[in-house]
Amino acid sequence: MDVRQFALEPNDARRLASLCGRQDTHLRLIESRLPVTIRNRGNQFEIEGEGDATKACVRLLDQLYRETRDSELTDDTVHLHLQEASTYQEDAQALVVIDTPKLKIKPRGQNQLGYINAIEAHDVNFGIGPAGTGKTWLAVACAVDALRRDQVERIILVRPAVEAGERLAVASSGNRLALQMSRLSVDHNIASRMSADCLSYAARTSDRAKAIISRRVISLDWPDREAMRQAKFRTQFWPNDMMQFADAGAASDYAGIKLPMGGVLHPYGRVIDPTLLTRFLAKDSQTSFNFHVVEIGRDDTEFHVVAKDGRRVSCDQLVFAGGADLDSLNRLLAVTGIAIDITSGQVSHVPETNNLVGLRAGISYGGYLTPAKGGYHELGATFDRSAGTEILATAHYHNRDLLPTGLAVQMPDPKAYGARISRRASTPDRNPFCGEIAANLYVLGALGARGLTLAPLLGDMLAAQMLDMPVTLGLDIRGGIDPYRFRRRVTKFDKKADFASS
């Protein structure tokens, strides 16, 4: 038996309570997964167990304690970290290898090992657990392995025909993972202040939605223009909760992998699951999917929206929040003078490799890189002004080559990448539209590549405006996102106007 004693610093009662959980539930969860006994008094801990298990437990508690700096720990967060920590039987796990055409996959932790063994031994299995723990990834990998060994003749992937909310987050926000981070400027202009306010709200909302995959985002001093911009930040005062500066060593510690340079740490930056966030935001709403709008009209009291299949909806207030589909509202755009730029972005799905297995923070530079979920990292993204929707092999090389050289060489061959492409809407000044454009007619859109950071707070602000309630953001920010900033206010609305739908 091995006994290890250590102290967690700083000695903070709130953070220690979050680490241990109510009535030490988090510590008991760890003990149930690792063959260890945990004892503590304040910030003094004693771990007793098998050698490798005690080492894993010490690392795990240290990682979890770091997490408590920014938010309260949840059972799901502890579970996900345990997935990485359960490595004390590596030799046994190494004997189990799933052979696929592109990768050889080994289980990570006892739960994954047991899951694979169950798939091998039984015809029907049910995988239950939090999102991102590899259930579907391992099941499909086992199926591919069985097909290669002629144990099965066909793989059939099935899912419920109608799943609650399955049509949510199918456009740009349908990416597997995304970064939430502020885009701060040296002069802290309107866009910068709005970005900071929106990130704070989005981070809290993502916490409540249990949509967080990892906490903190590191903006590298790369490329040169970004390094120069962030060098100016270092000459200014910024609160620690907005940004912190880190050299290559400190940034690597935060990231969990070796980084070739330092940069700016965004403590409230997040890597999130967009689908989980949008489902949370929509949970109390009434939704209607596949409603392809072909006509919008208005009489003296109500708007009337007609779908292609004949369905009709009437309402006294109407909001356009269709993302890149704003460009299809040609009649409205002509009336209001709203100018919309449409670009497309291709995100690469990069197979997880041993080089990046430890990555636990989002990385931002000229592009972005996320920790893995379901066996893939998200690497993005292109910026195509032609707004094409065809997935291009060349775009994978573009995304890889945006990385600093020290990271790019660690990436797998782009030929192994999967991809997703979607369109974004933006304005000439790169600030979104949020507000009333005619009596009881509103728009929220042109969020560019920052929708998952900006939309939660801007949506809340717009709802307050519609309900004639106090609005959260200051007048200067509201002016910077007002749809009328490019043209004077619209006074009339065509009662028979119809709009094409993409």
Image (cartoon, grey):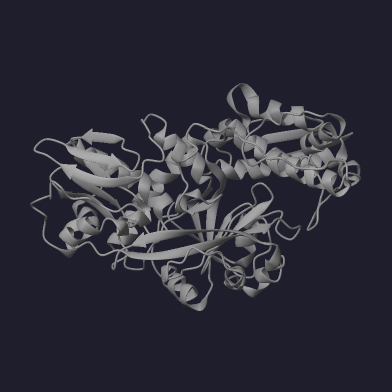
Give the position of the C terminus as an image quadrant: bottom left
User: x, y percentage for residue 459?
Assistant: 31, 43
| Position of 128 relative to 380 (above/below) | above
Q: Is residue 472 visible?
A: no
User: Which sits in the foreground, 241 or 453?
Assistant: 453
| Position of 202 relative to 378 (above/below) | above
User: Which sits in the foreground, 403 or 74?
Assistant: 403
Q: How many marks?
A: 0
User: x, y percentage for residue 200?
Assistant: 40, 47
Q: Is residue 89 visible?
A: yes
User: x, y percentage for residue 433?
Assistant: 27, 55
- Residue in view at x 87 percent, y 43 percent: 93
317 with respect to 99 (left or right): left
User: Which sits in the foreground, 109 or 394?
Assistant: 394
395 with respect to 104 (left or right): left
User: x, y percentage for residue 287?
Assistant: 38, 33
Query: Furthest residue to the bottom?
Result: 224
Give the position of the N terminus as an image quadrant: top right
- Residue in view at x 27 percent, y 60 percent: 190
| Position of 55 relative to 175 (above/below) | above
341 with respect to 277 (left or right): left
- Residue in view at x 55 percent, y 33 percent: 161
